[in-house]
Amino acid sequence: MTTPSVSFEVFPPKSVDAAFKLWDTAQALAPLAPRFFSVTYGAGGSTRDLTQDSAHVLRRTSGLPVSAHLTCVGASVAETMQTAEDYAKVGVTDIVALRGDPTEGQDRFAAHPQGFQNSIELIEALALTNKFTIRVGAYPDCHPDAVSQHANIQFLKRKFDAGAEEAITQFFFDAETFLRFRDQCAAAGIDKPIIPGILPVANWASARKFADRCGAVVPAWVDEAYRAAERDDRHDLLATALCTELCSDLVDEGVDSLHFYTLNRPDLTRTVCRALGITPQSALRDVA
Ligand code: FAD
Protein backbone atom coordinates (compact mmCIF):
# COMPACT_ATOMS: atom_id res chain seq x y z
CA MET A 1 0.00 0.00 0.00
CA THR A 2 1.39 3.44 -0.88
CA THR A 3 1.46 6.03 1.87
CA PRO A 4 -1.08 8.82 1.30
CA SER A 5 -0.49 12.48 2.05
CA VAL A 6 -2.75 13.97 4.70
CA SER A 7 -4.27 17.26 5.84
CA PHE A 8 -6.06 18.10 9.07
CA GLU A 9 -9.11 20.21 9.91
CA VAL A 10 -9.20 21.96 13.29
CA PHE A 11 -11.63 24.47 14.77
CA PRO A 12 -10.78 27.79 16.44
CA PRO A 13 -10.85 27.87 20.26
CA LYS A 14 -13.41 29.88 22.24
CA SER A 15 -11.77 29.52 25.66
CA VAL A 16 -8.31 29.22 27.16
CA ASP A 17 -8.88 25.50 27.71
CA ALA A 18 -9.89 25.08 24.06
CA ALA A 19 -6.83 27.06 22.97
CA PHE A 20 -4.62 24.53 24.74
CA LYS A 21 -6.49 21.68 23.02
CA LEU A 22 -5.90 23.27 19.61
CA TRP A 23 -2.25 23.77 20.39
CA ASP A 24 -1.91 20.15 21.60
CA THR A 25 -3.62 19.00 18.39
CA ALA A 26 -1.21 21.00 16.25
CA GLN A 27 1.78 19.73 18.26
CA ALA A 28 0.62 16.14 17.85
CA LEU A 29 -0.22 16.30 14.14
CA ALA A 30 2.27 18.74 12.58
CA PRO A 31 5.10 16.18 12.77
CA LEU A 32 3.10 14.00 10.35
CA ALA A 33 3.99 16.62 7.70
CA PRO A 34 0.43 17.38 6.53
CA ARG A 35 -0.07 19.18 3.21
CA PHE A 36 -1.99 21.80 5.22
CA PHE A 37 -4.13 22.46 8.28
CA SER A 38 -7.58 23.92 7.71
CA VAL A 39 -9.40 26.07 10.27
CA THR A 40 -13.21 26.14 10.33
CA TYR A 41 -15.43 29.21 10.31
CA GLY A 42 -18.15 29.09 12.99
CA ALA A 43 -21.80 28.88 11.98
CA GLY A 44 -23.05 32.27 10.82
CA GLY A 45 -19.51 33.68 10.80
CA SER A 46 -19.44 33.51 14.60
CA THR A 47 -15.68 32.83 14.76
CA ARG A 48 -14.48 35.27 12.10
CA ASP A 49 -11.68 36.84 14.17
CA LEU A 50 -10.85 33.57 15.96
CA THR A 51 -10.54 31.72 12.65
CA GLN A 52 -8.20 34.39 11.35
CA ASP A 53 -6.09 34.47 14.52
CA SER A 54 -5.89 30.67 14.74
CA ALA A 55 -4.97 30.32 11.07
CA HIS A 56 -2.29 33.00 11.44
CA VAL A 57 -0.73 31.48 14.59
CA LEU A 58 -0.90 27.96 13.19
CA ARG A 59 0.81 29.05 9.98
CA ARG A 60 3.50 31.01 11.79
CA THR A 61 4.28 28.34 14.35
CA SER A 62 4.03 25.23 12.20
CA GLY A 63 5.57 26.69 9.06
CA LEU A 64 2.89 24.68 7.21
CA PRO A 65 0.26 26.01 4.80
CA VAL A 66 -3.05 26.82 6.47
CA SER A 67 -6.38 26.97 4.68
CA ALA A 68 -8.91 29.24 6.42
CA HIS A 69 -12.60 28.45 5.88
CA LEU A 70 -14.91 31.26 4.82
CA THR A 71 -18.71 31.19 4.41
CA CYS A 72 -21.24 33.59 2.88
CA VAL A 73 -23.59 33.49 5.88
CA GLY A 74 -24.65 36.68 7.67
CA ALA A 75 -22.30 39.07 5.88
CA SER A 76 -22.40 41.41 2.89
CA VAL A 77 -20.14 40.84 -0.11
CA ALA A 78 -17.91 43.69 1.12
CA GLU A 79 -17.62 42.19 4.63
CA THR A 80 -16.88 38.69 3.32
CA MET A 81 -14.22 39.98 0.94
CA GLN A 82 -12.73 42.08 3.76
CA THR A 83 -12.36 38.88 5.80
CA ALA A 84 -10.57 37.26 2.86
CA GLU A 85 -8.30 40.31 2.54
CA ASP A 86 -7.56 40.11 6.28
CA TYR A 87 -6.55 36.46 5.83
CA ALA A 88 -4.22 37.45 2.99
CA LYS A 89 -2.67 40.26 5.06
CA VAL A 90 -1.44 37.73 7.63
CA GLY A 91 -0.16 35.39 4.93
CA VAL A 92 -3.12 32.99 4.85
CA THR A 93 -3.78 32.67 1.13
CA ASP A 94 -5.50 29.28 1.07
CA ILE A 95 -9.27 29.46 1.54
CA VAL A 96 -11.97 26.79 1.83
CA ALA A 97 -14.84 28.74 0.21
CA LEU A 98 -18.31 27.69 1.32
CA ARG A 99 -21.88 28.87 1.17
CA GLY A 100 -22.51 27.85 4.79
CA ASP A 101 -25.55 26.40 6.52
CA PRO A 102 -28.85 28.15 7.33
CA THR A 103 -28.70 30.24 10.49
CA GLU A 104 -30.34 28.96 13.72
CA GLY A 105 -34.11 28.65 13.35
CA GLN A 106 -34.11 28.73 9.52
CA ASP A 107 -34.80 25.68 7.34
CA ARG A 108 -33.10 26.88 4.20
CA PHE A 109 -30.08 29.00 3.44
CA ALA A 110 -31.09 32.63 2.95
CA ALA A 111 -28.44 34.96 1.59
CA HIS A 112 -27.64 38.24 3.36
CA PRO A 113 -29.45 41.07 1.48
CA GLN A 114 -26.09 42.40 0.22
CA GLY A 115 -24.32 39.05 0.41
CA PHE A 116 -23.16 36.33 -1.96
CA GLN A 117 -26.11 34.21 -3.11
CA ASN A 118 -24.12 30.97 -3.20
CA SER A 119 -20.65 29.50 -3.03
CA ILE A 120 -20.03 30.04 -6.75
CA GLU A 121 -20.32 33.82 -6.43
CA LEU A 122 -17.85 33.70 -3.53
CA ILE A 123 -15.42 31.50 -5.48
CA GLU A 124 -15.60 33.80 -8.51
CA ALA A 125 -14.91 36.87 -6.37
CA LEU A 126 -11.96 35.21 -4.62
CA ALA A 127 -10.55 33.97 -7.93
CA LEU A 128 -10.72 37.49 -9.41
CA THR A 129 -8.31 38.77 -6.73
CA ASN A 130 -5.65 36.30 -7.88
CA LYS A 131 -4.50 36.02 -4.27
CA PHE A 132 -5.92 32.71 -3.13
CA THR A 133 -5.72 28.97 -3.58
CA ILE A 134 -9.38 27.99 -3.38
CA ARG A 135 -10.75 24.73 -1.99
CA VAL A 136 -14.45 23.86 -1.87
CA GLY A 137 -16.82 21.32 -0.30
CA ALA A 138 -18.11 18.23 -2.13
CA TYR A 139 -20.83 15.79 -1.13
CA PRO A 140 -20.49 12.06 -2.01
CA ASP A 141 -23.81 11.25 -0.27
CA CYS A 142 -25.41 14.21 -2.10
CA HIS A 143 -26.00 17.58 -0.40
CA PRO A 144 -29.48 17.83 1.18
CA ASP A 145 -30.20 20.95 -0.95
CA ALA A 146 -29.36 19.23 -4.25
CA VAL A 147 -32.37 17.96 -6.23
CA SER A 148 -30.39 14.93 -7.45
CA GLN A 149 -26.88 13.48 -7.44
CA HIS A 150 -26.57 14.72 -11.02
CA ALA A 151 -27.33 18.30 -9.87
CA ASN A 152 -24.95 17.87 -6.93
CA ILE A 153 -22.10 16.94 -9.28
CA GLN A 154 -22.94 19.61 -11.86
CA PHE A 155 -22.83 22.19 -9.08
CA LEU A 156 -19.40 20.94 -8.00
CA LYS A 157 -18.25 21.22 -11.61
CA ARG A 158 -19.42 24.85 -11.66
CA LYS A 159 -17.38 25.48 -8.51
CA PHE A 160 -14.24 24.19 -10.25
CA ASP A 161 -15.07 26.22 -13.38
CA ALA A 162 -15.40 29.30 -11.13
CA GLY A 163 -11.82 28.90 -9.89
CA ALA A 164 -11.62 26.17 -7.25
CA GLU A 165 -8.49 24.04 -7.38
CA GLU A 166 -9.44 21.19 -5.09
CA ALA A 167 -12.52 19.82 -3.32
CA ILE A 168 -12.73 18.23 0.11
CA THR A 169 -15.68 15.95 0.72
CA GLN A 170 -18.12 15.73 3.57
CA PHE A 171 -17.40 12.62 5.62
CA PHE A 172 -18.91 9.26 4.66
CA PHE A 173 -18.82 5.75 6.12
CA ASP A 174 -18.43 3.52 3.10
CA ALA A 175 -15.46 3.61 0.69
CA GLU A 176 -17.81 2.68 -2.18
CA THR A 177 -19.75 5.93 -1.62
CA PHE A 178 -16.63 7.97 -2.33
CA LEU A 179 -15.36 5.78 -5.17
CA ARG A 180 -18.72 5.92 -6.98
CA PHE A 181 -18.81 9.70 -6.52
CA ARG A 182 -15.24 10.02 -7.83
CA ASP A 183 -16.21 8.03 -10.94
CA GLN A 184 -19.35 10.12 -11.49
CA CYS A 185 -17.34 13.35 -11.15
CA ALA A 186 -14.77 12.09 -13.67
CA ALA A 187 -17.59 11.11 -16.06
CA ALA A 188 -18.96 14.66 -15.69
CA GLY A 189 -15.60 16.05 -16.86
CA ILE A 190 -14.17 17.05 -13.46
CA ASP A 191 -10.42 16.54 -13.57
CA LYS A 192 -9.34 18.41 -10.41
CA PRO A 193 -8.50 16.63 -7.14
CA ILE A 194 -11.36 15.50 -4.89
CA ILE A 195 -10.00 14.69 -1.44
CA PRO A 196 -12.02 12.38 0.82
CA GLY A 197 -12.94 13.93 4.17
CA ILE A 198 -12.41 11.38 6.95
CA LEU A 199 -14.08 11.54 10.35
CA PRO A 200 -12.34 9.54 13.08
CA VAL A 201 -15.35 9.02 15.35
CA ALA A 202 -14.52 10.24 18.85
CA ASN A 203 -18.16 10.10 20.01
CA TRP A 204 -20.75 8.10 18.11
CA ALA A 205 -23.83 9.97 19.43
CA SER A 206 -22.45 13.31 18.18
CA ALA A 207 -21.18 11.85 14.90
CA ARG A 208 -24.62 10.30 14.28
CA LYS A 209 -26.39 13.61 14.92
CA PHE A 210 -23.96 15.46 12.67
CA ALA A 211 -24.39 12.85 9.91
CA ASP A 212 -28.18 13.32 10.04
CA ARG A 213 -27.80 17.10 9.78
CA CYS A 214 -25.43 17.06 6.81
CA GLY A 215 -26.98 14.17 4.88
CA ALA A 216 -24.17 11.61 5.36
CA VAL A 217 -25.73 8.16 5.04
CA VAL A 218 -25.11 5.89 8.04
CA PRO A 219 -25.22 2.20 7.06
CA ALA A 220 -27.29 0.18 9.54
CA TRP A 221 -24.34 -2.10 10.32
CA VAL A 222 -22.22 0.88 11.40
CA ASP A 223 -24.94 2.04 13.78
CA GLU A 224 -25.26 -1.45 15.23
CA ALA A 225 -21.49 -1.88 15.54
CA TYR A 226 -21.14 1.35 17.56
CA ARG A 227 -24.07 0.44 19.81
CA ALA A 228 -22.46 -2.93 20.55
CA ALA A 229 -19.00 -1.39 21.01
CA GLU A 230 -20.35 1.21 23.46
CA ARG A 231 -22.07 -1.54 25.45
CA ASP A 232 -18.73 -3.36 25.70
CA ASP A 233 -16.72 -0.19 26.33
CA ARG A 234 -14.82 -0.63 23.07
CA HIS A 235 -15.84 2.51 21.24
CA ASP A 236 -12.32 3.75 20.45
CA LEU A 237 -11.16 0.34 19.32
CA LEU A 238 -14.03 0.12 16.82
CA ALA A 239 -13.58 3.75 15.70
CA THR A 240 -9.89 3.14 15.01
CA ALA A 241 -10.52 -0.13 13.18
CA LEU A 242 -13.33 1.24 10.98
CA CYS A 243 -11.52 4.45 10.16
CA THR A 244 -8.28 2.64 9.31
CA GLU A 245 -10.14 0.16 7.11
CA LEU A 246 -11.99 2.96 5.31
CA CYS A 247 -8.73 4.83 4.64
CA SER A 248 -6.83 1.77 3.48
CA ASP A 249 -9.68 0.74 1.16
CA LEU A 250 -9.51 4.22 -0.38
CA VAL A 251 -5.72 4.11 -0.72
CA ASP A 252 -5.96 0.66 -2.33
CA GLU A 253 -8.24 2.28 -4.93
CA GLY A 254 -5.65 4.92 -5.80
CA VAL A 255 -6.63 7.71 -3.38
CA ASP A 256 -3.39 9.51 -2.57
CA SER A 257 -4.58 12.22 -0.18
CA LEU A 258 -6.86 12.16 2.88
CA HIS A 259 -8.33 15.07 4.87
CA PHE A 260 -9.08 14.31 8.53
CA TYR A 261 -11.78 16.07 10.57
CA THR A 262 -9.82 16.03 13.83
CA LEU A 263 -12.35 17.90 16.03
CA ASN A 264 -9.21 19.08 17.89
CA ARG A 265 -8.76 15.53 19.25
CA PRO A 266 -5.56 14.27 17.69
CA ASP A 267 -5.32 10.79 19.22
CA LEU A 268 -7.56 8.78 16.90
CA THR A 269 -6.30 10.62 13.84
CA ARG A 270 -2.70 9.97 14.82
CA THR A 271 -3.34 6.29 15.47
CA VAL A 272 -5.06 5.87 12.10
CA CYS A 273 -2.23 7.73 10.35
CA ARG A 274 0.32 5.50 12.01
CA ALA A 275 -1.60 2.41 10.84
CA LEU A 276 -1.46 3.82 7.30
CA GLY A 277 2.32 4.13 7.53
CA ILE A 278 2.43 7.89 8.11
CA THR A 279 5.11 8.46 10.72
CA PRO A 280 6.33 11.60 12.52
CA GLN A 281 9.04 13.55 10.74
CA SER A 282 9.75 16.72 12.70
CA ALA A 283 8.37 18.50 15.74
CA LEU A 284 6.37 21.73 15.63
CA ARG A 285 8.43 24.86 16.27
CA ASP A 286 7.79 26.85 19.46
CA VAL A 287 5.64 29.97 19.21
CA ALA A 288 7.75 32.79 17.76
P1 FAD B 1 -22.77 24.53 -2.15
O1 FAD B 1 -21.99 23.46 -2.79
O2 FAD B 1 -22.62 25.89 -2.65
O3 FAD B 1 -24.30 24.16 -2.17
C1 FAD B 1 -24.74 22.92 -1.64
C2 FAD B 1 -25.64 22.20 -2.63
O4 FAD B 1 -26.83 22.95 -2.79
C3 FAD B 1 -25.00 22.05 -4.01
O5 FAD B 1 -24.45 20.76 -4.14
C4 FAD B 1 -26.15 22.28 -4.95
O6 FAD B 1 -26.67 21.05 -5.36
C5 FAD B 1 -27.21 23.00 -4.14
N1 FAD B 1 -27.25 24.41 -4.55
C6 FAD B 1 -26.87 25.48 -3.81
N2 FAD B 1 -27.06 26.64 -4.50
C7 FAD B 1 -27.60 26.26 -5.69
C8 FAD B 1 -28.01 26.98 -6.84
N3 FAD B 1 -27.93 28.30 -6.90
N4 FAD B 1 -28.48 26.27 -7.88
C9 FAD B 1 -28.57 24.91 -7.85
N5 FAD B 1 -28.17 24.19 -6.77
C10 FAD B 1 -27.70 24.85 -5.72
N6 FAD B 1 -19.82 25.13 7.39
C11 FAD B 1 -19.50 26.19 8.19
O7 FAD B 1 -20.38 26.94 8.62
N7 FAD B 1 -18.19 26.46 8.52
C12 FAD B 1 -17.17 25.70 8.07
O8 FAD B 1 -16.00 25.96 8.37
C13 FAD B 1 -17.46 24.58 7.21
N8 FAD B 1 -16.48 23.80 6.70
C14 FAD B 1 -16.79 22.80 5.81
C15 FAD B 1 -15.75 22.08 5.20
C16 FAD B 1 -16.03 21.07 4.28
C17 FAD B 1 -14.90 20.32 3.64
C18 FAD B 1 -17.38 20.76 3.96
C19 FAD B 1 -17.70 19.66 2.97
C20 FAD B 1 -18.42 21.46 4.56
C21 FAD B 1 -18.15 22.50 5.49
N9 FAD B 1 -19.16 23.26 6.08
C22 FAD B 1 -18.84 24.33 6.91
C23 FAD B 1 -20.57 22.93 5.84
C24 FAD B 1 -21.14 23.73 4.64
O9 FAD B 1 -21.21 25.09 4.95
C25 FAD B 1 -22.52 23.16 4.36
O10 FAD B 1 -22.43 21.86 3.87
C26 FAD B 1 -23.41 24.00 3.46
O11 FAD B 1 -24.74 23.51 3.56
C27 FAD B 1 -23.01 23.94 1.99
O12 FAD B 1 -21.91 24.71 1.71
P2 FAD B 1 -21.20 24.54 0.25
O13 FAD B 1 -20.40 25.72 -0.03
O14 FAD B 1 -20.53 23.26 0.14
O15 FAD B 1 -22.52 24.54 -0.60
Image: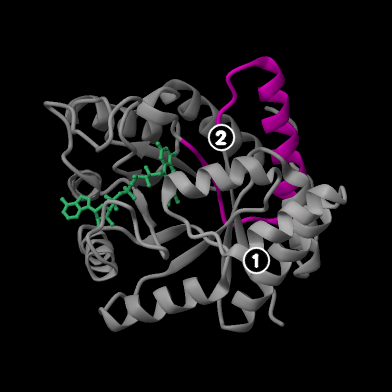
Residue 170 in picture, x, y percent from top left: 46, 55
**Type of amino acid under label 1:** Trp
Q: Is residue 159 above or below residue 59?
A: below
Mark 1 = which residue? 221
Closer to viewer: mark 1 or mark 2: 1
Q: Nearer the viewer, residue 12 or 64?
A: 12
Question: If you read the primary sequence from the N terminus, does the residue marked by circle 1 or circle 2 appear first?
Answer: 2
Q: Quadrant of residue 209?
A: top right
Asked if marks 1 and 2 touch (Cβ < 8 Å), the reply is: no
Residue pictured at 36% horizontal, 53% vertical: 136
Q: Is residue 15 above or below residue 11?
A: above
Of all residues, the one furthest to the left in this rendering is 113
Q: Secondary structure at mark 1?
A: helix
Neighbour class for label 2 at 10 Å: few (<14), some, many (≥20)?
many
Mark 2 = which residue? 11
Residue 16 in picture, x, y percent from top left: 68, 16
Quarter of the figure with the N terminus: bottom right
**Type of amino acid under label 2:** Phe
Q: Which residues are magenta?
A: 11-40
Residue 106 in picture, x, y percent from top left: 28, 29
Task: Indicate yes or no: mark 2 CB to ligand 1 under 8 Å.
Answer: yes
